[in-house]
Image: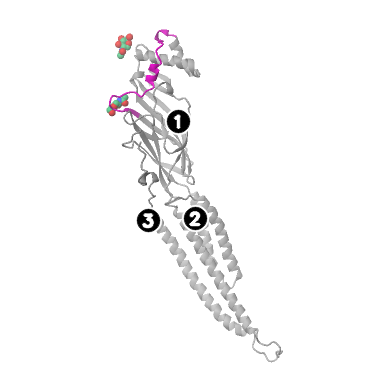
Amino acid sequence: MMVLRLLLHLALLRLGTTQPSVQGHHFHRPVLAQPSFFDPNSPLEVQEIIQIPNNGSAPLLVDVQVAVLNVFDVDILRYTVSSMLLLRLSWLDTRLAWNGSVYPRHMVTRPWDALWTPGLIIQEALWVDWQEQSPRAQVDQDGHVELQLALTTETNCDFELLHFPRDQSDCTLSFHALSNTAMQLEFQAHVVNEIVSVKREYVVRDLTARVPPQRRVPCFQVTLRLQNTALKTIIALLVPGEALLLADVCGGLLPLQATERTAYKVTLLLGYLVFHSSLVDGLPSSSSCNPLLIYYFVILLLLLFISTMETVLLTGLLARSHLGAKSSLRPAPSGEQQDPGNPGPNPEEVPRGVRGSWRSWAEAADHTFFLVYVTGVVCCQFAFAGFWMWTTCKSDPAPGKAVPHGGQPKM
Ligand SMILES: *[C@@H]1O[C@H](CO)[C@@H](O)[C@H](O)[C@H]1NC(C)=O
Ligand SMILES: *[C@@H]1O[C@H](CO)[C@@H](O)[C@H](O)[C@H]1NC(C)=O
């Protein structure tokens, strides 16, 4: 009876002081019609009712159901995830129960600040937007309280991007109730996947909720397993890279003497450099476990560079030998007119011998290089594929856990 009076009294207090919504008026009207319940109690009891319900020596058990409504933005460059969650908190507060035969109502709605509710923070959050500023709790006749909180949050997540764009990471959201101790409060968490939108790069493969043991502050954690399913990176990065490499290999089939060959290779290298710089901007980086793709593209750059250098060097040597052969001819005195009837040594004939040997040497070298290069390119591809399959990487331990004087905050 006392509890019921208190409840009604509180409801009246709120009607007088805070913004009375339409729903509020509707709810409070029967109370006003029964002034006998109105008991001008001291505000001490209001103070009492916003204290955490006592459960003897055991902590109060708060059941949390986390519904993940959406994971709408996964930013691998900033290492953040944005998500929308709905928390359904329920617990038992017997001080709020009432006698059903006196006040025949199964459920009442109370503003959240008129009773005790756990105050939650998210440890990894950059920002949290609680969608309702003053949520209302449902209280039933026996004192079961249910509070629903919808929130949008952007949280930090250590993505494991070694196998980007085929990566999978676990992102954790740790909810702490800072204003209570673990002696007073204990969470029991479940999680459900209520994501309905399907157009996305990263899909949620798994959801788990757990209560970490031995914390001074009551805590529960929700872990989202995110998997990258995007084809975009493969199409936009791997295919052009492979195409450039293939074009470069084919460039080796052009004859060494053709001046277009140098131009062709240099153009490819330039094109690749432009592609490379935009690609490096588009890939995330970290202190450990960088994406293997970065190494792959650097190897590609080196291969293109070596092949261009080879072409430039051999063409340069050929041109030099050509010039040398010409200049070795030039000292021949030009004072005597050659008798057209008596053909002297043809200026083209001697160098042709020299140039011919140079040319055959350079062509042989070019041919060998071509074979070595093709083998190298193929081996690189296989080596990289093997590396991709078998490499694993373990990130450095978090500074908060590794440093001897740091360690897990004593919460
Ligand atoms: C009180 O603690 C006991 C033991 O942990 C638990 O079974 C019970 O549900 C708790 N009661 C409330 C109201 O949380
Ligand atoms: C509820 O109120 C009725 C009528 O006043 C009373 O007879 C009954 O014992 C009360 N029940 C409880 C559980 O207090």
> Which amino acid, by three-letter code, is at mark 1?
Ala
Q: Is residue 104 visible?
A: no
Q: Kindly report which numbered mark, 3 or 2, lies closer to the viewer in this rendering.
A: 3
Residue occupying image coordinates x 51% and y 61%: 301
Nearer to the camera, 169 or 60: 60
Q: Which image quadrant: the N terminus?
A: top left
Q: CA distance from mark 1 to mark 2?
A: 41 Å
Quadrant containing ligand 1 reads top left
Mark sitting on residue 245 = none
Alpha-carbon span between mark 3 and mark 1: 42 Å
- Label 3, label 2: how many angstroms apart (C-alpha)? 20 Å
Q: Earlier in the sequence, mark 3 or mark 2?
A: 2
| Disc 1 + disc 2, Cβ < 8 Å | no
Label 3 Cα crowd, 10 Å radius (few <14 / some 14-19 / many 20+): few
Judged from the image, the secondary structure of the residue bearing numbered disc 1 is strand
Q: Which residue does the image show at 42% across and 33% down from the upper left?
A: 121
Which contiguous range is marked in magenta?
Answer: 33-62
Residue under numbered circle 2: 238
According to the image, label 3 marks what residue? 390
Question: Residue furthest toward the bottom?
Answer: 342
- Who comes first in sequence, dot 3 or dot 1? 1
Indicate the amino acid at tag 3.
Trp
